[in-house]
Image (spheres, rainbow, N blue to C red):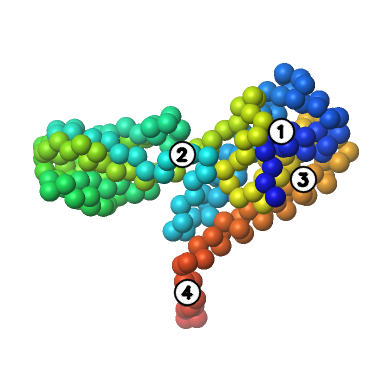
Amino acid sequence: MSINFSQTLSLIERNCKLGNGRISGNVNLLSDFTADINLALDFVYATIFDCGGKWQFDDSNHTDYPIITTNLVANQRDYSFVSDEAGNLILDIYKVMIKDPNGVYVEITPVDQQSDEDMASFYNGLNTTGTPTRYDKTANGIFLDVIPSYNSTGGLKIFINREGSYFLTSDTTKKAGFAGLYHEYLALRPSYQYAYRNNLSNIQAIQNEMLIMEDKIKKHYGKRERDVKRRLIANVEDNH
């Protein structure tokens, strides 16, 4: 069962024995618990992203896909990516495609210019131009191995992970953008933090429920790729 923001606050009130409406009726408490709920949301998404696999998670409250495009500019090697078009913080770049001179998107190869071999084209100062085939992620941007020799509208396509859609104190019916079966976690983690800060007697019970829910989230998203056939790989041990 999924729960909305108001229901999440009510569950926290019950867990922490605060009384009905205590959080929503107190500006300071509402602000504090909204921040804790959003931190719990961050933890859930970090957990989901760690599950990896070929299925890329994204908050269902976002109105677009986690793919951004930008223009490829002749004689420009580096491109900065801090946030998507809606202002959501980009957490990771996991695939880059580039339009070749014929207007066809092709995937280019990620490399590390600081440790991989044959990286001279990134830093030798010759500024060779052409069609890039590799990229290096540094800080909040990417560097192309050769400098583009042409302009291309929407010539860079970046596949990303991004932050979730956070709650505001004014939200009431909004729900978190992950599986509704686990929305209770957004109440459990803030409840645990409040119980810890205030030395509540039921802190251990809340913590146990929180840890059980974390494990369920990991298992759920670790098995999300039902359309991908799983293989058993033999573990060969060398006994010599």
- For this orientation, the residue located farthest to the right is 201
Q: CA distance from mark 4 to mark 2?
A: 35 Å
Q: Secondary structure at mark 4?
A: loop
Q: Which mark is residue 6?
A: 1
Q: Secondary structure at mark 3?
A: helix
**Nearer the N terminus, badge 3 or badge 2?**
2
For residue 13, side relative to residue 76 (left or right): right
> Where is mark 2, residue-wise?
63
Discs 4, 2 touching: Cβ within 8 Å: no
Q: Amino acid at mark 1?
A: Ser
Between 128 and 148, the one nearer to me in the picture: 148
- For this orientation, the residue located farthest to the front is 173
For residue 13, side relative to residue 111 (left or right): right
- Residue at left offset 24%, top offset 38%: 154
> Where is mark 3, residue-wise?
207
- How crowded is the residue under tag 4: few (<14 C-alpha within 10 Å), some, or many (20+)? few
Discs 3, 2 touching: Cβ within 8 Å: no
- How crowded is the residue under tag 1: few (<14 C-alpha within 10 Å), some, or many (20+)? some
Q: CA distance from mark 4 to mark 1?
A: 44 Å
Nearer the observer: mark 4 or 1; the answer is 1
Q: Amino acid at mark 2?
A: Thr
**Nearer the N terminus, badge 3 or badge 1?**
1
**Nearer the N terminus, badge 1 or badge 2?**
1
Residue 64 sits in which quadrant?
A: top left
- How crowded is the residue under tag 3: few (<14 C-alpha within 10 Å), some, or many (20+)? some
Where is residue 10? Give x, y as percent.
77, 34
> Where is mark 4, residue-wise?
231
Nearer the observer: mark 3 or 2; the answer is 2
Where is residue 192? Give x, y as percent.
76, 38
Camera sees residue 39: no
For residue 210, side relative to residue 155 (left or right): right
Camera sees residue 86: yes
